[in-house]
Image (spheres, helix red, strand yellow):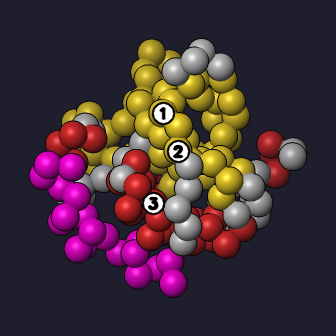
Amino acid sequence: MNISDHGAGTASPCHDLFTYGSLMCGDIMTEVAGAQLRATPAVLPGYRRFLVRGEQYPGVVPDRGGTVAGLVYHGIDEAGWARLDRFEGELYDRRPVTVRYENGSGAMVDCYVFRPEFASRLTEIEWEYTAFLRDGKALFQQQYRGFKAID
């Protein structure tokens, strides 16, 4: 695959996705992707994760000293990618990134990175998964417009 040709809306049969926010929840990912997928814990070096203003979910942005913990979902088919692209919407650009697995190996996978033109919508608050599960997941599932876009 030519990396320069890879981006939002591009078909990616049987490719992997690094998730770092709401899609780390297996039930949400299954609903959005339209399939139950195998996941592996991973970290994304060179990025940081911040809460989107007025929302329950984060965006990642490049940051040389940063590291973001998340999950890589494996084997997403073309239909799953189409649903994911619609769910993520205009704030994110799907692009290849390099992650590290717990065993020390690395892999190139896709990730939805927050678009620079929307940077003003990010807060300075680092998003935390445990806080999302405790305080934000139910509200996110009720309010996030991306769920309506996937079908």
Mark 1–mark 2 distance (CA, rounded to whole Å): 7 Å
> Which structural element holds mark 1?
strand
The answer to whether 113 is drawn above or below residue 128 in the figure is below
Question: In which quarter of the view is residue 72 placed?
Answer: top right
Q: Which residues are magenta?
A: 133-151
Residue sitting at the far right: 2
Q: Which residue is mark 2?
A: 39
Amino acid under disc 2: Ala
136 falls in the magenta region: yes
Marked residue nearer the N-terminal end (3 or 2): 3
Q: Main secondary structure of the magenta part?
A: helix
Which label is found at residue 29? 3
- 39 left or right of 145? right
> Which structural element holds mark 3?
helix
Q: Are marks 3 and 2 in contact (CB under 8 Å)?
A: yes
Q: Are marks 1 and 2 in contact (CB under 8 Å)?
A: yes
Residue 123 location, x and y as percent?
Answer: 25, 42
Amino acid under disc 1: Pro
Q: How many marks?
A: 3
Question: In which quarter of the view is residue 20 placed?
Answer: top left
Marked residue nearer the N-terminal end (1 or 3): 3
Q: Nearer the viewer, residue 103 or 80?
A: 103
Q: Residue at x 76, y 51 (%)?
A: 6
